[in-house]
Amino acid sequence: MPEKPGAWLMGTAKHRAIDLIRRRQTLERKHEEIGRDIERAQESTDPDAAIDEHIGDDLLGLIFMACHPVLSKDARVALTLRVLGGLTTEEIARGFLVPVATIAQRIVRAKRTLTEAHIRFEVPRGAEREARLASVLEVIYLIFNEGYSATAGEDWVRPALCEDALRLGRILAELAPTEPEVHGLVALMEIQASRLRARLGPSGEPVLLLDQDRSRWDRLLIRRGLGALDRAERLAKAMGPYALQAAIAACHARSATAAETDWPRIVALYDAVAELAPSPVIELNRAVAVGMAFGPAAGLDLVDALVSAPSLKAYHLLPAVRGDLLRKLGRSAEARAEFERAASLTENVVERKLLQRRAAECGAEEMAG
């Protein structure tokens, strides 16, 4: 039990309520815009055709509209996350690992481009819809990630965002039943969402993956996720990045305990992801898996090679991972410094406390040694 259960419950409820109010306000505003668009469309098009093109969810339809090919990929995603996803410019910047000013400029330029090109906001059809699919998937997953591991604030998780992303992903899977990466993304989100309850301890403290009580994982979501992964694998000649990451999540979901995890397979899957969608973050995740499969020294070698990556310079998980590997190697003093650096970089209050606690534990080990 928390020391002050009433205060903890009220604080959690307040943050959930604020999230819900913001999302409702955004949706109400977009409903008004949709109503005006429909009225204009009915003046010049067949109403029955407009009904046929209803995409199943107003917000999802608007995301497709905003992901217009006249914009660059980065601009599409940034604009959609800000205007429709309900994320702040700061949250989007942390998701892209770029300065806030960069995202702000992308959003301003994107709005200007759409205005100057006189883009009509309408649900795309056929090939045009397919061309925007990758951007839409990225938007949905970034929304989910902000809910699964909040980049700032006093909440470790924001379940409302995860629920929104899952709902949109499921609708998209109905609209595009033959697209393997849609099912891959749904599988990834379902399996990751299954851990949400286990990610928080009794007092709201964060619980890392290897320390989670797996009996608290939602078995229904896991079954749904594995089913979606099976569909993705059957539809694709070769698995895409989302399906591969879902397969990694499935390795954890199929393991009754952390000790039973098939880490060599996870390393192989990360190798495949890195080949299709290379990024420093993927390489960092791969380094964690290598450290688990082949020892912390092997993982540390890979992490050290990433220290100079510009996009990871202010990424708190780089020193956090490095600190964990150093601690396993018995290098407590160096580990403490890394955890302290990670704590100074994160803007999530709960995560900062976790990292500070780990730094203190390393300091105690250092004194004892």
Image: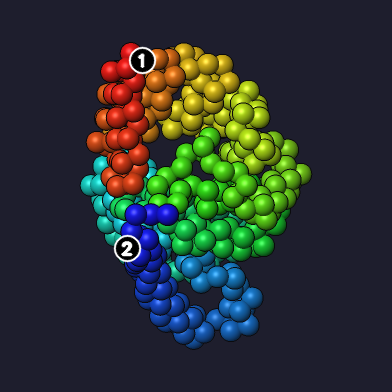
Relative to the observer, which residue lies in front, 37 or 146?
Answer: 146
- Colour option used: rainbow
Residue 216 visible from this viewpoint: yes
Considering the image in quadrants, where does the N terminus appear?
bottom left
Pick the front one: 237 or 147: 147
Instruction: Estimate the x, y position of residue 123 in percent, counting from the top left.
Output: 53, 67
Query: Is residue 136 shown left or right of residue 51?
Result: left
SS for dot 2: helix
Residue 228: where, in percent of width, then height?
Answer: 69, 50
The residue depicted at 48 percent of the width and 23 percent of the height is 287
Tell me the residue at 38%/45% (across/down): 95
Q: Position of residue 341 (x, y in %)?
A: 26, 30
Q: Position of residue 88 (x, y in %)?
A: 31, 57
2 or 1: mark nearer the eye: 2
Q: Alpha carbon of mark 2 to alpha carbon of mark 1: how far?
A: 39 Å
Examine the image and state in which quarter residue 331 appears: top left
In this view, the residue in front, 170 or 36, is: 170
Q: Secondary structure at mark 1?
A: loop
> Which picture quadrant has residue 27?
bottom left
Quadrant, the C terminus: top left
Question: What number is the disc on residue 331?
Answer: 1
45 shown above or below 27: below
Q: Earlier in the sequence, mark 2 or mark 1?
A: 2
Which disc is residue 7 wearing? 2
Is residue 113 something that shows in the picture?
no
At label 1, the amino acid type is: Arg
Name the kind of residue labelled 2 in the image: Ala
Report the disc number at residue 296: none
